[in-house]
């Protein structure tokens, strides 16, 4: 029931995903009287789907705390409980992010050794794709949280992105070890010592995200959310500039006619729907958040993210990596900058 | 002496600025044996310039604290002291940002009522230009700092951008008043009550920067620095995508030939040199930081920023605005979210 164009967009998205993943089946949670007639119009989807009725719907304006207390029988709550009970391998929602994270955390809890879950997403870069986390689950993060995110991101890059030794960077305001704040210095020191099954690159800056300097970008949820949305806003601004450019003169319009095919590919490449589907990592269950304003194609991509996570057994791999991790800072190796600031 | 291509780039930049601002004169601080022969080649510039010799040069790797203690006779230190002593209306440097801010703060101090200076820059948006601060001077900011930045940004928008009632937004992870952290809630409450000579919009998100939702974007230096560099990185990524697009097929190459003029304008519009020149606001003197990797054209723009600030009497206007400002939070109007979180 979540998102600007639900439930039609959700059903159409599943109908696209059905063709991509023929072995996947669907459970739709929400008002049966709304869902049933629309689902019945999509016969092949209806054949592999069930509906679980719920009268209660989480609204975009609902407070996460209230939803966690009172919304466990909402369509969102029931979807997450289906994951908990093993009836679904993952839940995908385009609804209220805070409520979804709150319910998911309350119902599923975190994997062993993980204090807080994080929101992660793919980021397009000059090299390939990177994964960035946290994108908004945790406004305040200490060093341990950042280290946890690094480990989870690392697992994700190895499994879903298929990289053997992914590089991990901590987002900071400079690459020197004296830049930033205490939590970053401490996290860097732990990661240098931790024997991450990947490569710890050190600190990176905002422009390193799009450069693809590292495969895994680790940051607190406040900074990550703002970096993600700043990148989205800048991409939209540039797309608007390009659109204006090809309308700015007669010759430019002719140029557009010739380059139309290539420009269509550019549009596809920068289509935000390609990157739809933020993963909740660290939970004992798969939950993916779709952008609320997306369409069926974007929602199908979010479903694809959940399918990928399940196929790669990401929960088991995160658990295994955490079991082998040391997160103690060896005091004698503290860098000068850290000592000065603590 | 600062920047990747100094001192030649600095002299060439001044030579461009000289034509734009015929009434401006220049003092160059640095090694006279290096500067003199290069300056003498630019006769019209030499005629309106003097050189103040210094053997000591601040390096990019120097720690700000060390520079503040030992670098007051460096070329950077002497330039700032010239501002303090009224020998120059402003200082422009492409050197070490932290050292420049440290020296500027130590030598010039802040304007009355301002605790900490901020780094500000123009940001291109879908509407026009906005100003964003802080971009890295203060990693940790409390509510009072954020309010100060809002007032300074407001003055800047009124004077240099020429807006009558600029809108001010606090960068956050959501527009609802319960999103984010304590310092933001408290700053928002003060700004709602403060009678800013402009309009307080409330919270904005990362994508609002490029949308141009507000004229003044206020944030702490950690977040602001990362948002700025993320935007720069994304713009570069998109430019690279566009370049590849027009090389991707024969038709696209032909399209490029027709659209070449329009695309050249697009390149000019997105040229980072246009936005070169970060302002240090809140100091009792004008200091502008140029990007270290810029060229003469970019440096000329940074000089232009300093000239604009001086011409608009920005220091006097900031002082006047601070004198009339109330920064106390009326306790009875604290929003529920704030009360819950404190």
Image (cartoon, coloured by chain):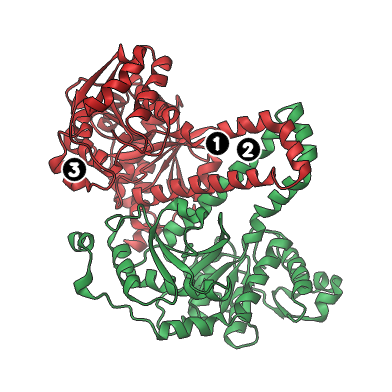
Chain colours: A red, B green
User: Marks 3/2: CA distance?
Assistant: 42 Å
Instruction: Pick whichever, B103 or B17, lies toward us.
Output: B17
Mark 3 or mark 1, which is nearer to you?
Answer: 3
Tell which subunit mark 3 falls on: A
Give the mark nearer the N terminus: 3 vs 1. Answer: 3
The tag on residue B176 is none
Location of the C terminus of chain A (image quadrant):
bottom left
Residue A179 visible in the picture: no
Label 1 close to label 2 by CB (< 8 Å): yes
The tag on residue A67 is 3
Instruction: Pick whichever, A304 or B258, lies toward us.
Output: B258
Location of the N terminus of chain A (image quadrant):
top left
For mark 3, does the 10 Å Cα neighbourhood hold few (<14), some (14 to 19), or many (20 or more) residues? many
- Of helix, strand and loop, which one carries label 2? helix
Q: Is residue B28 left or right of residue A44?
A: right
The tag on residue A270 is 1
Residue A25 in percent (x, y) is at 30, 16
Tell which subunit mark 2 falls on: B
Q: Which residue is mark 2?
A: B241
């Amino acid at each position: 029931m979540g998102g600007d164009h639900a439930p039609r967009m959700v059903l159409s998205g599943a109908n696209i995903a059905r063709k991509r993943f023929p072995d996947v089946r669907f459970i739709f949670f929400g008002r049966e009287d709304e869902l049933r007639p629309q689902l019945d119009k999509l016969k092949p989807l209806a054949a592999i789907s069930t509906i679980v009725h719920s009268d209660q719907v989480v609204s975009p304006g609902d407070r996460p705390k209230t939803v966690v207390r009172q919304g466990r029988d909402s369509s969102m709550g029931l979807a997450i409980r289906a994951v908990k009970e093993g009836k679904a391998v993952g839940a995908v929602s385009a609804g209220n992010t805070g409520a979804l994270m709150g319910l998911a955390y309350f119902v599923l809890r975190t994997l062993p050794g993980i204090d807080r879950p994080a929101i992660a997403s793919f980021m397009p870069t000059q090299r390939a794709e990177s994964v960035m986390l946290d994108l908004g689950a945790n406004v305040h993060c200490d060093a341990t949280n950042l280290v946890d995110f690094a480990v989870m991101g690392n697992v994700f890059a190895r499994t879903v992105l298929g990289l053997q030794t992914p590089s991990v960077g901590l987002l900071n305001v400079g690459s020197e070890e004296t830049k930033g704040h205490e939590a970053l210095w401490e996290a860097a020191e732990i990661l240098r010592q931790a024997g991450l099954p990947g490569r710890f690159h050190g600190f990176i800056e905002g422009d390193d995200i799009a450069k693809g300097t590292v495969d895994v970008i680790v940051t607190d949820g406040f900074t990550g959310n703002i970096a993600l949305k700043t990148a989205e806003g800048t991409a939209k601004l540039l797309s608007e500039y390009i659109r204006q450019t090809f309308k700015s003169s007669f010759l430019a319009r002719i140029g557009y006619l010739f380059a139309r095919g290539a420009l269509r590919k550019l549009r596809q490449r920068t289509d935000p729907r390609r990157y739809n589907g933020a993963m909740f990592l660290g939970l004992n269950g798969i939950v993916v958040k779709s952008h609320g304003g997306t369409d069926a194609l974007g929602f199908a991509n979010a479903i694809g993210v959940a399918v990928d996570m399940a196929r790669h057994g990401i929960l088991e791999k995160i658990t295994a990596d955490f079991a082998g991790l040391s997160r103690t800072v060896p005091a004698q190796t503290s860098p000068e900058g850290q000592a000065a600031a603590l």
